């Protein structure tokens, strides 16, 4: 079986005689086929970002895009008189995407050749293929989640956030508070599961154990009263960050076992991991339980290690660890980080809404007795 | 490398750290000032401090040394750097 082609993460459009028919500088008015609008909207809803590399007058071209009602779909447009290979490279750099995930569409064979000469890894398409793109596998992601649909919006909010951070002078906490961050921690339902699975696949950087949980495994845990599957979303005044974290927790008598904590590296700078850990420590303290977190150090999840240590987790032994099943031979490099949970004050840098794990558990225990 | 490692004194490290914090936080900090309590530094910034100390002073901060209290003040960080550099020099010798 042939390998699936690598997904395109950003499609870069030429304008004249590609996105629209006609040349805006010469013809003044151009014709914009509705079928092209449908392609732009379809790709956007699949989470594929779109940009522009056009040799044009910036103001004229941008005004035209606004008039057509599609300007908002494009991130980091490169409209000017430079080489298109440079424009494509700039767009990829700004998005921090590899060139292998960039596609370029242009009616001029010389422009496609110029881009491919400098960047053979960029996939180039002639303008007449525009209406075929949505049928191609490289433009068809396996998962389309709520977050994919909002990906462009999240990137655009990110640009505004970065611009503000650059001009902010002052203590770190003040900047974080100025973002008006809201973290929503909730028990996952069936709909959330695809996002959870996508997140555990995509967040290797901040995945504490490197274990990927399958959809079937997660689905079984949803209905198990001794397990919690928890998702975390984050938003601020610039817009949503989407799903940024997932936790798998198993209750034992004397301890709560944090089997997985994965957070998106996009939100590391907001201290989301520490806020989440502090909430969990406080809940465990209310239940009188110790916390044990599985952690497998890799060269990519150092920040997670630091977050655990800063939250107070250590490798010191405790009797409660005997309650846990022994690690499998293949998991010998997993550390069990331990903490005697204590009450923690709420986060000062963001508003957190979260389920009352300890209280809910006490209610269930009461019902059983 | 060992020779130059032993040359750094507590005063020099303290001065370097205060300079770094001044430029990043845009405010002067005292050697014994609690950076977390004063709200100057979030736990996120403390993570960046870990990386800064490791790169600047050629040390590895791991395991039990990675506790928030080690980064609470300039003095605490200086002690940590001195201890880890001494341990590394001892191991090299
Ligand atoms: Zn214990």
Image (cartoon, grey):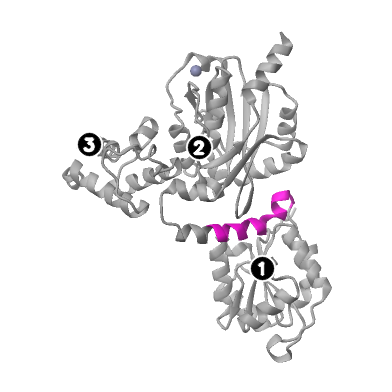
Residue B86: assigned label? 3
Which of A96/B46 is in front? B46
Mark 3, Cα crowd under 10 Å, few <14 / some 14-19 / many 20+, is some
Would residue A66 be seen by someone viewing this image from the given angle? yes
Residues at circles 2 and 3 in contact by the CB criterion of under 8 Å: no
Residue A134 x %, y % = 78, 64
Residue A274: assigned label? 2
- Give the CA distance from mark 1 to mark 3: 54 Å
If you read the primary sequence from the N terminus, does the residue marked by circle 2 or circle 1 appear first?
1
The chain to which mark 2 is attached is A
Q: Which residue is mark 1?
A: A74
Mark 2, Cα crowd under 10 Å, few <14 / some 14-19 / many 20+, is many
Looking at the rendering, the stretch of residues picked out in magenta corresponds to: A142-161
Residue A361 x %, y % = 66, 19
Which of A263/A133 is in front? A263
Name above or below for residue A79 compared with residue A342.
Answer: below
């Amino acid at each position: 079986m042939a390998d699936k082609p690598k997904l395109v993460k950003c499609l870069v459009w030429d304008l004249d005689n590609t996105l629209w028919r006609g040349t805006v500088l010469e013809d003044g008015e151009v014709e914009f086929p509705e079928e092209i609008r449908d392609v732009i909207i379809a790709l956007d809803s699949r989470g594929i970002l779109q940009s522009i590399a056009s040799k044009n007058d910036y103001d004229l071209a941008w005004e035209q895009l606004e008039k057509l009602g599609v300007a908002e779909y494009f991130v980091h447009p490169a409209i000017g008189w430079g080489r298109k290979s440079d424009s494509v490279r700039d767009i990829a750099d700004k998005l921090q995407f590899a060139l292998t995930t960039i596609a370029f569409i242009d009616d001029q064979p010389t422009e496609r050749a110029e881009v491919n000469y400098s960047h053979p890894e960029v996939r180039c398409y002639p303008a007449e293929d525009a209406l075929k793109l949505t049928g191609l596998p490289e433009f068809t992601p396996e998962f389309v989640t709520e977050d994919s649909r909002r990906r462009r919006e999240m990137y655009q909010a990110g640009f505004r956030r970065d611009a503000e951070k650059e001009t902010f002078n002052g203590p770190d906490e003040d900047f974080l508070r100025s973002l008006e961050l809201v973290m929503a921690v909730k028990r996952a339902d069936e709909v959330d599961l695809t996002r959870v699975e996508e997140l555990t696949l995509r967040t290797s950087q901040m995945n504490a154990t490197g274990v990927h949980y399958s959809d079937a495994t997660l689905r079984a845990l949803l209905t198990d009263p001794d397990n919690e599957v928890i998702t975390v979303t984050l938003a601020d005044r610039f817009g949503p960050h989407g799903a940024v974290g997932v936790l798998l927790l198993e209750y034992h008598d004397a301890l709560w076992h944090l089997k997985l904590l994965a957070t998106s590296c996009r939100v590391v700078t907001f201290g989301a991991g520490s806020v989440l850990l502090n909430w969990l420590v406080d809940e465990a303290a209310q239940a009188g339980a110790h916390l044990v977190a599985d952690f497998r150090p890799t060269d990519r999840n150092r920040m997670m290690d630091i977050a655990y240590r800063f939250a107070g987790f250590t490798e010191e032994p405790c009797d409660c660890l005997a309650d846990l099943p022994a690690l499998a031979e293949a998991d010998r490099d997993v550390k069990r980080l331990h903490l005697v949970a204590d009450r923690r004050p709420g986060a000062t840098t963001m508003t957190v809404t979260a389920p009352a794990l300890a209280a809910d558990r006490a209610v269930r225990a009461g019902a059983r007795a | 490398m060992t020779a130059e490692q032993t040359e750094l004194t507590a005063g020099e490290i303290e001065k370097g750290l205060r300079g770094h914090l001044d430029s990043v936080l845009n405010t002067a900090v005292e050697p014994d000032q609690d950076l977390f309590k004063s709200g100057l530094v979030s736990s996120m910034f403390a993570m960046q401090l870990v990386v800064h100390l490791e790169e600047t002073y050629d040390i590895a901060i791991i395991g039990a040394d990675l506790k928030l209290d080690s980064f609470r003040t300039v003095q605490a960080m200086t002690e940590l750097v001195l201890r880890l550099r001494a341990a590394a020099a001892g191991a090299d010798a």
